[in-house]
Image: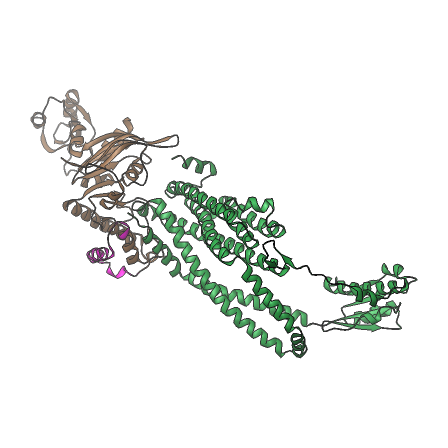
Amino acid sequence: MNHLPLIIKREYLNKVKNKSFIIMTFLSPLIMVGLFALIAFLAQLNNDKVRTISILDESKLFVSQFKSTDKIKYDILTNVSLEDAKKIVQESKNYGLLYIPKADSIDALADKIKFYSEDSPSLMTMEEIERKIETKARDIKLRKSGIDPDLIHKLKVNVTANLETFSGEKTSKLGSTLKLVFGGAAGYLLFMFIIIYGNMIMRSVIEEKTSRIIEVIISSVKPIQLLLGKIFGTSLAGITQFLIWILIGGILMTVVSTVFGINMSGSPMASQEAVNQVANSAEMQKMMNLGMQEVLNLPLANLAIMFVLFFVGGYLLYGSLYAAIGAAVDSETDTQQFMMPILMPLMLAIYVGFFTVIENPHGTVSQIFSYVPFTSPVVMLMRIPFGVPIWQQLLSIAILFGTFFLTVLFAAKIYRVGILMYGKKPSYKEMRKWLKY
Amino acid sequence: MDNLLVAENIVKKFGDYTALNGVSIEVPKGSIFGLLGPNGAGKTTLIRIINQITMPDEGLVTLDGVKLQSNHIKDIGYLPEERGLYKSMKVGEQALYLAQLKGLTKNQAKERLKYWFDKFEITSWWNKKVQELSKGMAQKIQFIVTVLHQPKLLIFDEPFSGFDPINANIIKDEILQLREEGATVIFSTHRMESVEEMCDHIALIHESNKILDGKLIDIKRQYKSNIYEVGLLTEQKAETEKYLKEHFELSEAHFKTINDELKFNIKIDAGQTANELISHLTSKGQLTHFVEVIPSVNDIFIQTVQNN
């Protein structure tokens, strides 16, 4: 008798009707978006603070470089000693004091510049100050050597190589970034999905064990049917939750960004920004068009189909392993020792994906890991936007699904024995024995 | 008599451990069959093999003469010792689900559940969650689900554990009723008094081997020891006892009487009859108590297991 649809239905409804599941489904996007909004708000708050930096320039060479901006106000001190300057800065609670001494030459000066502050100053601020001094110092040295800095500026040539593949497709650096975003998002999504819903499968198997209903069920249903029913039912519940998250998240994000957009236009910077925007709008439009072009240039259909296949395959592969673990243990606390072998290849896949694939999508390491079934879903998904021959994709899919059938058989064996074992914390050695029962 | 279930030479090994070593049982149609044995003897393994939860390494199980196969699932109702329900599911939903797994349609299941819920007067539980029920209440649901699909063969593993005496009695009556209606029952328990009361066949499994089986009456006859429990009212207690000890095997007996009798268990030789013993005894005094000592299942269990 085939009870698979019945089991899937029960697993699905049981998950979806669960109160904490419903709460999580609707609360998570709220929390996430709330968090983003908070971070955005805090960042703005942080930036709003104007830093005042006092400058004591005894060489008088660099004063002209320091023009106050929205974020940093430069306060030029003159005719005070360094000791007095320090006192003034401390009393006025300014951010810091930049001290440039008199020196015989620019080179001698370079090592003697000092920055005094209460705490360690922010890296960004220091870099900005150092850059300003370096530029000025270089200009002075250029002039001394008889070269006009303006001339050098004029002679500068901007080169942007127009990228094109041999088959005539135009690409750009923007395109590469887009590909990374697409591939990375797909790989990461799968990774998250496996961890969240794999755990859910495991818990649902453990629940059947601890509630002792398993023997009743297993006397009417083949273990492999129950196992598959659990994996499919939980996946459907997961997909439902994911879709709701994306939907709610999307709506909330739009709402929040609109609200923040209004906030920005309300600020005094708005008019200035608007002017900039008008000036840049032609360029912006061009960028947008280019971006759209790039998105359309991606192998979108290929990506979509393969995303579904790898997603399903990868999830089923790991899901069956999670189920086997659930069957082997009595409670969730006992699962720790068995989680490592699952998490390791997953982490590896993510690391390979985010370091190796970004570096070289078609390098040897990337290629190998896009065939290994435990890492291929993530790694191959990240490679596909960069163009992978169809036969390679199909080969990888074939290996993945082939391995899935093996792991399901393996999991079913562990499952069949494990679900009827109570009160024992199994070891790997014992589980190996179960395979022979 | 026809056998509903026959298991022949069942061998089951778990690694190096042999759980069943060539065990055969025959369960006659319409009987209540007691499957007995100490803890860890292999009863549950045998029951799981009958339920096709595990497969035997060797041997053959037939139901109604047909080799056990997957569509036999609907012919068997199994109440395992380790039993439970989904805690977060509602009682009614859950009963429907389990009934459908046994091959009933949703409407059939609803109809029959209504009958049983009315019978046990638990209709109000339908929308309750299982975690709100007491252990005894949950056991009732499990019992209903076990018998709902009207299987030919019912297997109960410790069916009375968790029930109070009143509910245990209700369940006992239901089991007897189901037998009347034609079901065959395999019954595994450590409560010997329920075996005594209900079973007509038993099999005793010890350390993976079957060491005893047959009709309960036959087994009792076989274990008969020709011992009688006697109360004898006499003036000369000491002399009478001395005299009897010279001619018979005597042992101490404990039973309640209203007089100050001489009480003892007395064993006669296989050739002698009870009548001869009685006439012998009546010549020594007034006979107030005379009962044949029939071995209880409990005694047979302990004796057989210890001898092996």
Q: Predominant secondary structure in magenta?
A: helix
x and y percent of residue A366 in the render? 58, 47
> Split into 4 quadrants, where in the image is the C terminus of chain B?
top left
> Split into 4 quadrants, where in the image is the N terminus of chain B?
top left
Q: Colour of chain A?
A: green
- Residue at the extreme right: A104
* Residue at the (36%, 45%) spot, across then down: A224
x and y percent of residue B168 in the render? 23, 48
Task: State left or right for residue A6 relative to residue A342.
Answer: left
Q: Is residue B106 magenta?
A: yes
x and y percent of residue A266 in the render? 62, 79
Task: State left or right for residue A15 relative to residue A274.
Answer: left
Q: How is the image coloured?
A: by chain
Start-end of magenta stretch: B100-127
Q: Can residue A61 be spotted in the picture? A: yes
Q: Is residue A362 magenta?
A: no
Q: Quadrant of residue A151?
A: bottom right
Q: Is residue A200 above or below residue B205?
A: below
x and y percent of residue A51 in the render? 74, 70
Q: Quadrant of residue A297?
A: bottom right
Q: Give the chain letter for brown.
A: B
